[in-house]
Amino acid sequence: MPQPIASGGPETSAIECEGLTKFYDGHIVALSDVTLSIPRGAAFGLLGENGAGKSTLVRLLLGFLFPTAGLVRVLGEEQVARAHPRLGYVHERPLFEPRVTGRQYLRYFAQLSGLWGQRGQRRIEAALETVGLRAVAHRNVGGYSKGMLQRLAIGQALLNDPELLILDEVTGGIDAGSQWEVRQVIGALHQQGKTILLCSHYLAEVEAICAQVGILRKGRLVLSGSVERLLSAEGAVEITLAGDLRAVEVAATLDLADHIIEARDNLLRIPTDAQQTVLAALISANIPIHALNPLTQTLEDVYMRATRSSVTAEDAAPAQL
């Protein structure tokens, strides 16, 4: 089981899950024994293919579903509905009334949240400013681009000035320029100190926004931790030999084959955990070294390794999802 990214009580964690399990119809496993802690103020990316359990986890966090077993706590509340006034949520497919203006759309939701009069108007204008839609707030929503609609949905989630934002696939189906604009909004909100839970299929997007990630596969949390640590873990080191030395010949002469990932020209690529052994052998043999550079992985590398390595004999049995 992966270790949670952080420990702590309600004072330090925005979201806590302990052994969280959810069955549908008594036997269909949507989530299995998920243990996870997301610190307040973090930007956390939740990754996983369709059917991995991301949507089920979000619904449990929002109180739309109840766990079969385990504990979920949001902003210190085990009865997670009590946290609703302090969180904002953007659904992966938000609905809009095309005949109203952007400002009218937000006013409707502000009033539903109990924000009336000048207080409500201040929150509406602040939300429009944050998502960059103030100049077009007088236009009907039906004339907005998909990217503008997504920013409007984020604006609606900001009306109550939430501590925690849960964003479900907020850049899905929009063009690259609009994705960039949405990412800028999310990044600015995180800089303000808001906790972000971003569910996304876009690995590069998560890597750009989030400092911490969790990867779900078939309802299990197969990996979690800081992006920096995950990208450096199980990485490699590249050693450049000086002069005209051939890496293949050096590796053969020093009997280093078991520690080499790749040898070509004057380059030796080795696992990080073999660095001390290989360097000691080179130094003992007076082999000159020109450079030594750590090679990090991409988040895509980490994701593919985590999801492929989690294929076990149990996975080979008839799927429960």
Image: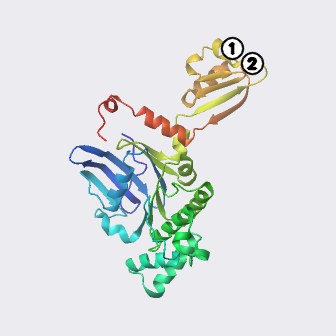
Foreground of the two, 157 or 1: 157
Residue for point 45% across, 37% down: 306
Residue type, label 1: Glu
**Outermost residue, right direction?**
243
x%, y% of residue 215? 43, 44
Q: From the image, which quarter does the C terminus lie in?
A: top left
Q: Reply above or below: 252 against 203.
A: above
Task: Check the image and report above or below for 221 versus 80.
Answer: above
Residue 167 x, y percent position in the rendering: 46, 59
Quadrant of res 76: bottom left
Report, in whole angstroms, how far the alpha carbon at label 1 lies from the one at label 2: 8 Å
Q: Are marks 1 and 2 in contact (CB under 8 Å)?
A: yes
Residue name at image x 63 percent, y 57 percent: 177
Q: How many numbered discs sit on the rendered protein?
A: 2
Judging depth in this view, the residue of 274 and 305 nearest the camera is 305
Which amino acid type is marked by label 2? Leu
Name, please, the residue furthest toward the bottom: 117
Q: Quadrant of residue 115?
A: bottom left
User: Are there few (<14), some (14-19), or many (20+) residues within 10 Å of tag 2?
Assistant: some
The quarter in which the N terminus is drawn is top left
Question: Which residue is depicted at the point 46% across and 79% down?
Answer: 107
295, 250: nearer the viewer: 295
Q: Which mark is residue 249?
A: 1
Residue that label 2 marks? 245
Q: For label 1, count other residues whose C-alpha is less than 10 Å away and answer few (under 14), some (14-19) or many (20+).
A: some
Q: Is residue 57 above or below residue 284?
A: below
Can the viewer see residue 113 in this picture? Answer: no
- Regarding mark 2 in the picture, which secondary structure is present there? loop
Identified at 47% across, 54% down, the residue is: 44
Side of 154 where 216 appears, left or right: left
